[in-house]
Amino acid sequence: MALNLVPKFTNRSLLLVLVLSMTTFSGIASGSKEFKETNMSMYLHDFISGPNVTDIPVAGVAGKLWTFSQFGSFYVTDNPLTEGPSLHSPAVGRAQGVFVASALDGLSALIVFSVRFTNKEYNGSTIEIQGNSILMEPVRELSVVSGTGKFRFARGYATCEFYSVDTPAGYAVVRLNITVEHR
């Protein structure tokens, strides 16, 4: 009499083996590098008028004035970022992107921008930020959705709060706080 030494597998046992092996391999792959957390603060200088304008309207509703609060107005922006609130503080980089007045009541905007670093420590790296910004809130929170260079695989959040506003000059300083996890 011959013994059958080959184990008999059912569909359930094959499925269990497959799931366990996938879990093991994905755990090995994702555990290869730890994420580190970086917290930073910088100041964004926003010029909506004058010779140093950094926000330009490029589209909007035909026949309507294109403003920050006019639904459908689309702006391109390229703002300087500095270490301190003075425009003459050491440069950190640029905040480059777009925003759209996305609420019918004009109270919020969809914002998408890159923090492009030019300082020594992070030169050439970027952090990608996006979200819905309620314009008159004292602190607005946005998502960090990715990054490059030293911020690869970045995820986290950013807060924006007005530091100072000079309405007649069309100039505002915004404190930008960023908390990210990255490789």
Image (tube, rainbow, N blue to C red):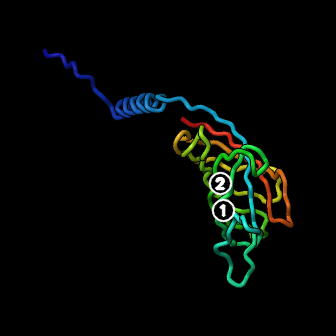
Q: Which residue is mark 2?
A: 95
**Residue flagged by tag 2: what amino acid is it?**
Ala
* Residue appearing at x 28%, y 26% in the figure: 8
Front in this rendered view, residue 63 or 49:
49
**Residue flagged by tag 1: what amino acid is it?**
Thr
How far apart are the two marked residues, 1 and 2, measured between alpha carbons? 7 Å
- Please report whichever mark, 1 or 2, sits nearer to the chain's N-terminal start: 1
Pointers 1 and 2 in contact (C-beta within 8 Å): yes
Instruction: Assess disc 2: are there few (<14), some (14-19) or many (≥20) residues with their C-alpha within 10 Å of its C-alpha.
Output: many
Secondary element at tag 1: strand
On screen, residue 99 versus residue 32, left or right, reads right
In the rendered view, tell whether residue 3 sits above or below residue 152: above
In the rendered view, tell whether residue 77 sits above or below residue 71: above
Q: Quadrant of residue 26?
A: top left
- Residue 131's label in the rendered image is none
| Residue 32 x, y percent position in the rendering | 46, 28
Query: How many discs appear?
Result: 2
Please, which residue is most extreme toward the front here? Answer: 88
* Residue appearing at x 33%, y 31% in the figure: 10
- Quadrant where the N terminus is found in the figure: top left
Q: Which residue is mark 1?
A: 77
On screen, residue 31 versus residue 144, left or right, reads left
* Residue appearing at x 83%, y 59% in the figure: 136
In the rendered view, tell whether residue 153 sits above or below residue 113: above
| Residue 104 x, y percent position in the rendering | 75, 71
